[in-house]
Each structure stands twice: as structure tokens, then as C-alpha cells.
Amino acid sequence: MNESDDSRFEFSHDWFTRWIPAWRAHVPLCTRYVEVGCHDGRSFTWALENLCVDDDATAIAIDTWRWPEVERRFDANVVATGSSYKVRKLKGASRRRLVELPDGSADVVYVDGSHEARDVVLDGCLAYHVLRTGGVLVFDDYRWRNPEGKRFLPPKPAVDAFLSMHADVVDVLYEGYQVMVRRTA
Ligand SMILES: C[S@@+](CC[C@H](N)C(=O)[O-])C[C@H]1O[C@@H](n2cnc3c(N)ncnc32)[C@H](O)[C@@H]1O
């Protein structure tokens, strides 16, 4: 439980801290955590230290890491947690890496990668299979708006499509800028 001790880390942005109360309320401790879109690891290291507390817990990090300096910071931040032995990196597009994970193998999946609806719908549908029954799936950026001039569809229609296609197998736990669901079947 080290969220106040940020001096160990080097992060470029903070997209995550404001979600910690909702995560504490709805996202359980887990032994198998998967994050899609890790950047330099702020949410990932928080999950590693606050959710993956068991010695035998594992945390899988998926990202394209297009910029070497971001990947270098991610690696250093993971080392700073002292828990790098729990971490497995899968570098590449999420649609290629999520399919490598066994069905039902995760307790929590956090989808925070591409902001394009056609990618987000794939991430959600693949994540559903990776999640065990009873596990929790979190989407970020549900209410994100495209900057002017960006013509691709944002995450919301993808998350809405996911929710209607999975209405019989998920319960919605939280809906705001993030959406959190529990897999029920
Ligand atoms: C907003 S950042 C993630 C922030 C991080 N979860 C946090 O809160 O600290 C989005 C990340 O998604 C990654 N990304 C974008 N498209 C992706 C894709 N198709 N597959 C895997 N990662 C992707 C980017 O490289 C970037 O690092």
C-alpha cells in the first residue's frame, strides 16, 4: 500500500489517481491481473502494489510501447515496486496479445489501450474470455471525447456495444468516466 510514496517512480502523466476510490470500492484483490495499455505504468504499478498483494500473484502488461523512453520508464517503475518477479510483459497490439492468454485466466482485466472504438470493442470481447467467471473488467475513457479533427469513433459506442452483447453475462458495477463490470457467466 504505497500510493503516497511516488518518489520511487517516474511518470509522465496521471490518468489514474482519481479512480483509486472507485477501484477500492469495486475491484477486488487478485492473483491474476491483466492491463491493456500500460504506458509508463502508473495504473499498473498501483495494481501491482495494491491488488496483486499475494506472493504468487501475477500481473500481465500489454502495450505497443512505441516510444522506447516510455517503455524504459515502465521497466524502471516496475523494478521500483520490488515486485518485478510478478510481472510478465507482452509487447504488441492488444488484439494479437490478448488471444495468447488462456480463457478464464484473469481475475481483473483493465482495458486502457487504444481509444478507437473498433479496437476497444475487440479488447472488451477478448478480455471477456480471458476473465474468469466472477472476475472484473474495467474500461477507461467511456466518456472520452475526440479532440477536434480526430475522426475515429471514441470508446463509448464500443463499450455500449460490449454491454448490450454481454447483458446476460455481466453485471454493471460502476458507470462513469470508467465502466466496471463483473462477469457472471
Ligand atoms: C492512456 S495510456 C495508458 C495509461 C495507463 N493505463 C495509466 O493509467 O497509467 C494508453 C496506452 O495504450 C497503448 N496502446 C494504444 N493502442 C494500443 C493497442 N492497440 N495495443 C496495445 N496498447 C496500445 C499506448 O501505447 C499507451 O501506452
Image (cartoon, rainbow, N blue to C red):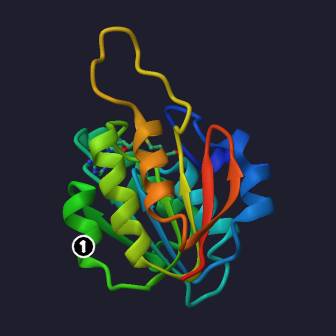
| Left or right of 52 in this view: 4 | right
Above or below 178: residue 100 = below
Quarter holding the C terminus is bottom right
Residue kind at label 1, given as amino acid type: Val
Q: Disc count in the image? A: 1
Image point (66%, 71%), residue name: 51
Residue 3 seen in render = no
Residue 148, image x, y percentages: 38, 9
* Viewer-side residue, 56 vs 130: 130
Residue 126 seen in render = yes
Furthest toward the bottom, the residue is 56
Instruction: Provide the residue designation for mark 1.
Output: 99
Image point (62%, 75%), residue name: 52
Quarter holding the N terminus is bottom right
Residue 154, image x, y percentages: 39, 31
| Left or right of 118 in this view: 46 | right
Image point (57%, 47%), residue name: 9
Above or below 125: residue 151 = above
Above or below 67: residue 97 = below
| Left or right of 110 in this view: 18 | right
Residue 4, image x, y percentages: 78, 49
Ligand 1 located in image quadrant: top left
* Viewer-side residue, 121 vs 19: 121
